[in-house]
Amino acid sequence: MPPAFTLRPLSLAVALGALLPLAASLLHAPLVMAQGQTVAFNVAAGPLAQALYSFGHQANLLISFAPAQVEGRASPGLQGTYGVEQGFAQLLAGSGLQAVPGANGSYTLQALPEGNLVLPTSSISGTAVGEGYADDSAPGLVAKRSSVGTKTDTPLHETAQAISVITRDQLDARNVASLNDALHYTAGVNTSYSNDTRNDAFNIRGFSSDFFYLDGTRLPAVSGRGLDQFRVDPYQLERIEVLKGVSSVMYGLGEPGGVVNMVSKLPTAEARGQVDAQLGNHDRYQLGTDVSGPLDAEGNVLYRVIAQQTGSHNQVDYVKGTRTLLAPSLTFNPQGDTRLTLMASYLHDDTMDSNNFLPYYGTVKRTALGQRLSTHLATSNPGYENYDKEQFSLGYLLEHDLNDNWTLRQNLRYAHLTLDNQALFGYALSGDQQSIARAAMNLQSSFNDVDLDNQLQGHFSTGALAHTFLAGLNYTNQNFYDSEGYGYGYLLNLYNPTALHDAVAKPSFNDTQTHQVQRQTGVYLQDQIALERWRLTVSGRQDWVNTRTLDNLADTRSHASDSAFSGRLGLLYLFDNGLAPYLSYATSFQPLIGTDAYGSPYTPLKSKQWEAGLKYQPKALNATFSAAVFDLRQQDALTEVPDTDLNGSIQAGEIRSRGLELEATAQLTPALKLLAAYTLQDVEVTKGSAADASTGQRPTAIPRQLASLWLDYTLQGGPLRGLGFGAGAQYVGSTYADTANTLKVDGFTVADAALHYDLPAWRFVLSANNLFDQQYVARCGSATRCQYGERREVLLSARYAW
């Protein structure tokens, strides 16, 4: 069981969750929906009984039905502005039921006459508002809109860049426990980064992705470093969006592979709530609550409280940890001209390091003595090991409509993080391949980060051209403190690890003591132009980045000022049959800290990308299909110095990534859902110095092929109506453990499965990742830094919703 103090934040949140709906019900006065009136509904997909309750609450209607009528039936939800009759038609589509009006404006459910089980889609009308800028919620598996590519509410089908959206329904269906898990079935994203308890690590289009965004604002990060990563738990998210490829024009500095934006759950207009419990192997337990609704009769103040407590051991011996999460939010005047959402989050990870660095010989290949290391082997010392991270954030989303065509927005987030981390890791293999030399690490770091994004959006026309114009000013201030100490020579016999319990002296902070302040100011303009079926996007951004670094050990100060222009052009054409071909070109930049081997400051890395694609959104099917080919090049990359008398790097390299991405997300029938993705990428160091062995080779740990498939089938009738089955597989191609591409790491395929059952107020999910418990090496960053992939993980989740 967890320590008592870890349950206090959760107990407080549960108490708040119980009291707030009561307060809301006392304040709420019933309103009557007038004949012919329309309402902006936000009813989540799920059990039909729950959907009808939400619908009736939002429309102030009395709906009568017998429990047996709706038992095991599901609803696609309702997102948009509808009248009562149209709303019922959408909610009950495919259920075999109809809503019959009764006395005093009440409704009763009845079975449809035989032969009329499906209502024609022409009887439903409404304007989709459920995937707008404010909350980006989307019912079901298939998202149709997103703001991640343009910072405006734009259909994905009309955005000239590859975008993937992981909806809340997908997160729930697969029992997702981390950001890495969420991205497993996404084209262009490689998540084969072992079972690390400390951070999420993946790459997009062959480049690492270290900069994450939450509701459009950047979270604290240092490129190439994941130890002190600001993490977001999937339980607090409505969806996850992946914008692939170069994207500095909207987001400023960052890696060229793409941007991951996580969208928070926000307060809802209807009173709702849920309690979630989860058990799993490795002694995993989890308890969470998510309650939301109005706090006043008029619905001008909405609230949401999310809380969760998690504890677990790990496949690596001795590793265990807990997580505490709390995320409250308030929305004011959601239906008026001015909308303000205040948001806060708190997360505490008290865990250990499961991210062993193991040698190539002993994992990928057997040693000279025919040995192979266990996936349970710990290389650190459980008495020394510690990973204690505490983080919180405060922010708001502010939106004001100047008139029907012009809107002002301001998004602000302050984020703070502190980390205390001690661990031992291997860095050299003995000649007999039996032992590794380990280093003891002592690390303390902290972030204080402010990200402010101001936007002015307008709609206007010039002749036959319709414009969506966006002007923005973005400011980021990041304070980063880092103290590190290392002690070397702790020898460990890998096949008789008695030294795991030896005393370890904690190194003093004599290797690194730095304070870095980085300020970025960016000004951007964008015009989305529509002419009949043509869509043209023109974007430009100018950034100024100022970085000051104080080295307390050397008592030195350095200063770097960089500026860069980023641009994007995208052209797309909409055919009647749902096809939309497009072509785009974009540039980006990424400042580097430090000096090269000759003492000159690094200049920002520059990247450029061509992308051509085809999107397909069939009219008769709730689905999206996409294909994209791209050529992405990063210039001025770091490469080895040719002068053997000097240490360090120079900027003389180029990395090229080009490839093909195919992706499908579809509700094939009311019962059958599909996720499919395939990636073929050619990533190569195309240019380097004469001393660089990686020139002409593929970077380490980057596969050439990725593929995934997930199918989910839910019974729509019979005594087991509501019972569903999901199964999938992920394939990751072979990689290399060295820059010369001589040490090959075999590819692998992992199978996943899920069994779920929906009842009127309950949902149960039993899932298994790596169903057949395959043992495989997930990646090797070098010959001494290989990591095993996650063994079988079984989770049983139960949810009660009201």
Image: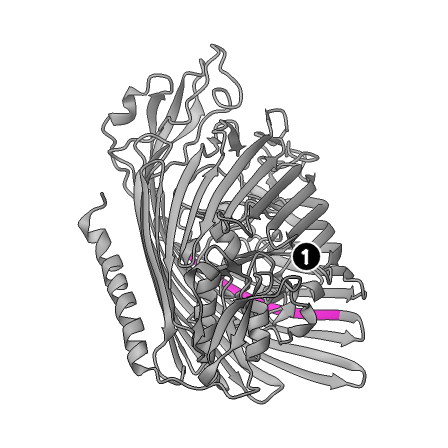
Query: From the viewer's perspective, is 1 left or right of 285?
Result: left
Query: From the viewer's perspective, is 453 left or right of 555?
Result: right
Find the residue positioned furthest to the left. Answer: 4
Give me the residue at 32% from left, 77% from top: 24
Vertical placement of residue 733 versus 82, above or below:
above
Asked if one can make out residue 393 in the rendered structure from this viewpoint, the answer is no
Q: Position of residue 218 (x, y in %)?
A: 49, 62
Query: From the viewer's perspective, is 380 left or right of 712?
Result: left
Residue linked to disc 1: 624
| SS assignment for the magenta stretch, majority | strand
Asked if one can make out residue 365 in the rendered structure from this viewpoint, the answer is yes
Q: Position of residue 49 (x, y in %)?
A: 45, 63
User: Total of numbered circles in the picture?
Assistant: 1
Q: Which quarter of the rendered picture does the C terminus lie within?
A: bottom left
Find the residue positioned furthest to the front. Answer: 114
Q: Quadrant of residue 141?
A: bottom right
Q: What amino acid type is highlighted by mark number 1?
A: Thr
Residue in the foreground of this view, choosing between 751 and 255: 751
Vertical placement of residue 247 versus 537, above or below:
above
Q: Position of residue 432 (x, y in %)?
A: 44, 13
Give the magenta-colored segment's residue range. Answer: 536-549
Under circle 1, the secondary element is strand
Find the residue positioned furthest to the top. Answer: 369
Give me the residue at 53% from left, 75% from top: 100
Residue in the foreground of this view, choosing between 478 and 93: 93
